Every structure is written in structure tokens, then in C-alpha cells.
Image: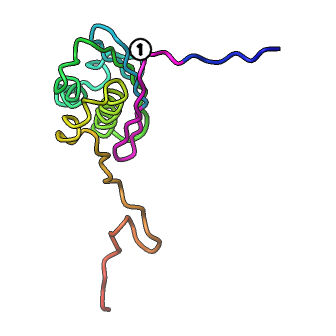
Amino acid sequence: MAKTKTVKDPTKFYGTGRRKNAIAKVWITAGSGTITVNQKELGAYFGKKTLEMIVRQPLELTDMLSKYDVIANVHGGGNSGQAGAVRHGIARALVVADAELRPALKAAGFMTRDPRMKERRKYGLKKARKASQFSKR
């Protein structure tokens, strides 16, 4: 029995984006510019125009908004973190598609992973740093 080799699709590019606790798996393919997040249209998923703007930023910067279709699966975190994760994933996928876009995306700050995360809760405290009220007597 012969083994079949999977052929990588040269028109589909992948990038993983992360921000806070959100993780986005992003694929870009040649197309008309539709952006789908978790099988929903961009506007229907995020709702806020500012979050939609955040997701589109790398495509607008590189003038690729009407050249690629974006399919993203995102989980974890909140709305803002998910939008940032999708933006990071789109930027990484664009670099895989065309390495010459990297300097422009890096200068705009889209290639950098935002490391800020929620601090873990410590024992003996109510939250990460909140302690119960101190009383001398």
C-alpha cells in the first residue's frame, strides 16, 4: 500500500495569533476580502466598529484588504483580546504569504505578541493582590 503525501496548498497561508488569553488560528486565501470569524461575518461576531477596525489594520496597512479572504477560529479571552489575537494571526499569515511585508508590519507593532495577561491568584488573598482588610485589634 503506497503512502499518499499531502500537498500543501500554495494559495492558503496560516498564522497563529495570541493576545491575553485569546488564541486565534487564521488562514488567508486569495479572494475578494471577506473576513469570517468562527463561521460568522466580522461585523456579526464582534459587533463594535473599533474591534472590526483592529482586525482589518494589517490588511489595510499592506493594501491587501481586497486581495485576501480571511478565515479565523478564535477562542478564549474576551472581545478585545480576541480581536487582537485575530490581528496578530493575520499579520503572521501575511508574512508567510509575502516576507517583504514584515518590516512594515513590525514597525506598526502587529508582529509583536502582547504579553499582558491576568495575574494568577495567590493563596491567602482574595484575588491576585487583594487581601482582606487589616485590623490591628
19 drawn magenta: yes
Q: Residue at x 26, y 30 (%)?
A: 100
User: Looking at the image, what colour scheme do you see?
Assistant: rainbow
Q: Is residue 65 placed above or below 136 in the rendered structure? A: above
Element marked by disc 1: loop
Furthest residue toward top: 32
Residue in the foreground of this view, choosing between 88 and 50: 88
Main secondary structure type of the part rendered in magenta: strand
Residue sitting at x 22%, y 37%? 103
Residue 51, picture quadrant = top left
Residue 120 occupies which quadrant of the picture?
bottom left
| Tag 1 residue | 11
Magenta residues, start to end: 8-24
Residue 77 lies, in percent from the top left, at 38, 41
The verdict on residue 13 being magenta is yes
Residue 12 spot, x, y in % from top left: 43, 17
Q: Position of residue 59 (x, y in %)?
A: 22, 23
Judge by depth and name the residue closer to the eye, 78 or 74. 74
